[in-house]
Amino acid sequence: MARHGGFPGMGMGNMQQLAMKAQKLQQQMTEKQAELEARTYEASSGGGMVTATVSGKKQLVSLVIKPEAVDPDDVEMLQDMIIAAVNEAVKQADETTEAEMGKLTGGLGMPGLF
């Protein structure tokens, strides 16, 4: 008897059910991604002297520098504080995205999706 394509033991009903689940997961992931991109993440450095806010798209949207952080004789320290604050805010965005998307995928580690 000739075999038809597909996976052994999986009838058309199972394949349709699997396709529907995949479509639902894709929709949930798209919605979650949009929600995460709409969030903002804030981090400070230098004891609150520099505060950076990034969007879920990892774009710097705000940078607040307290006047007392500006020392013309030590610009390097200010630069370091800015870099630290921005990097921490981006890290928060990354970690939140990974955690939230991991909830949807059940921790399947799907590279390239987010």
Image: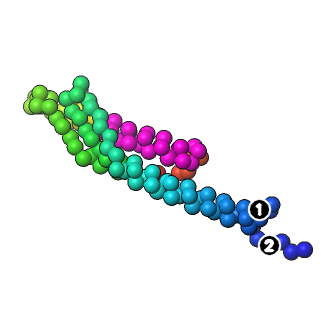
Q: Is residue 29 above or below residue 77?
A: below
96 left or right of 22?
A: left
Q: x, y percentage for residue 104?
A: 54, 47
Q: Is residue 3 above or below residue 93?
A: below
Q: x, y percentage for residue 105?
A: 56, 48
Residue farthest top in this picture: 47
Question: Residue 57 versus residue 83: which sits nearer the camera?
Answer: 57
Residue drawn at 62 percent across, 62 percent down: 20
Q: CA distance from mark 1 to mark 2?
A: 11 Å
Q: Is residue 39 above or below residue 24?
A: above
Q: x, y percentage for residue 74?
A: 14, 29
State yes or no: residue 87 in magenta: yes
Q: Earlier in the sequence, mark 1 or mark 2?
A: 2
Q: x, y percentage for residue 69?
A: 15, 29
Q: In the image, what residue type sits under mark 1?
A: Met
Question: Residue 107 versus residue 14: which sits nearer the camera?
Answer: 14
Residue drawn at 61 percent across, 58 percent down: 21
Name the residue that disc number 2 marks. 4
Residue 10's label in the rendered image is 1
Q: Secondary structure at mark 1?
A: loop
74 left or right of 27?
A: left
State yes or no: residue 88 in magenta: yes
Q: Please give the range of residues in magenta.
A: 86-107
